[in-house]
Image (tube, rainbow, N blue to C red):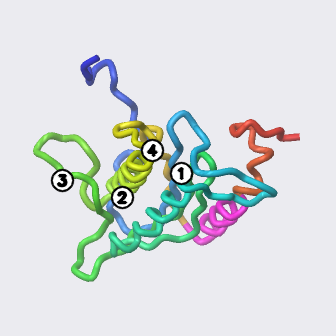
Amino acid sequence: MPNNPLAHHRKSIRLKGYDYTCPGAYFVTIVTHRRACVFGEIAGGVMRLNEWGEIARLEWVETAAIRREIELDEFVIMPNHIHGIVIIMECENGLVGATGRSPLRSTMPCGPANKSLASLIAGYKSAVTTHINAIRATPGAPVWQRNYWEHIIRDDGDLSHIRDYIHNNPVQWETDVENGGDPA
């Protein structure tokens, strides 16, 4: 079915008017396609990465090596999602933002802005998908849900709370209703 922008328009979940190329700290969550548990399993409150989970971890770490204008903080790879803190800093040359393997923007108004949080996430998701699909011989198969969730970290208290949440996420897996757990 051809794409019809009027019928398939998705409302943005980004903060209206906010420039996501701005220096700052961002908490991101990226979820696998159909919430499939493809990165490993939780055993005794500890995440045990499988081969695909290790790819997701290595590509996340590589993100900071490719994109010198960002730093990575606390992160965790879970069976069906990743949580991480990305810090976009001002570059030595005065440029701001994060970019990487995302495609160059054409003259058409589509795709993430260069040097933005969205281009960083697009590059990461593309790298993980390409690597996993090469191993499982499934070119073009989705690994991730469309889009991602983000939160602009506003202060040190917010940062501390989010770091604790990420660190404790594997322990909470068994009681998380979204993961089939029992909250009782």
Please state if 13 lies on the left or on the right of 126 as rendered: right
Q: Name the residue type under label 1.
A: Thr
| 88 lies left or right of 75 | left
Residue 125 x %, y %: 40, 51
Which callout, 2 or 4, points at the residue further toward the start of the chain?
2
Is 4 placed above or below 183 here?
Answer: above
- Closest to the observer, 55 or 2: 55
Marks 2, 4: nearer the viewer: 4
Residue 164: in magenta span: yes
Specify which label sits upstream in the sequence, 1 or 3.
Answer: 1
Q: Secondary structure at mark 2?
A: helix
Amino acid on which the number 3 mark rests in the picture:
Leu
The residue under the point 61% across, 64% down is 158
Residue 82 against residue 36 in the figure, above or below = below
First along the sequence among labels 2 and 3: 3
How far apart are the two marked residues, 4 and 3, measured between alpha carbons?
Answer: 28 Å
Q: Magenta: predominant secondary structure element?
A: helix
Crowd band around label 3 with a 10 angstrom C-alpha radius: few (<14), some (14–19), many (20+): few
Q: Which residue is mark 1?
A: 29
Q: Mark 2 and mark 1: span between their CA atoms?
A: 13 Å
Q: Which residue is mark 2?
A: 120
* Residue 32 in the image: above or below residue 11: below
Residue 29: in sight, yes or no? yes
Mark 3, secondary structure of its residue: loop
Q: Which numbered marker is on residue 136?
A: 4
**Residue tagged by mark 3?**
104
| Separation (CA) of disc 4 from disc 1 | 24 Å
Residue range corresponding to the magenta coloring: 155-168
Q: CA distance from mark 2 to mark 4?
A: 24 Å
The local secondary structure at tag 1 comes to strand
The amino acid type of the residue labelled 2 equals Leu
N-terminal of the pair, mark 4 or mark 3, is 3
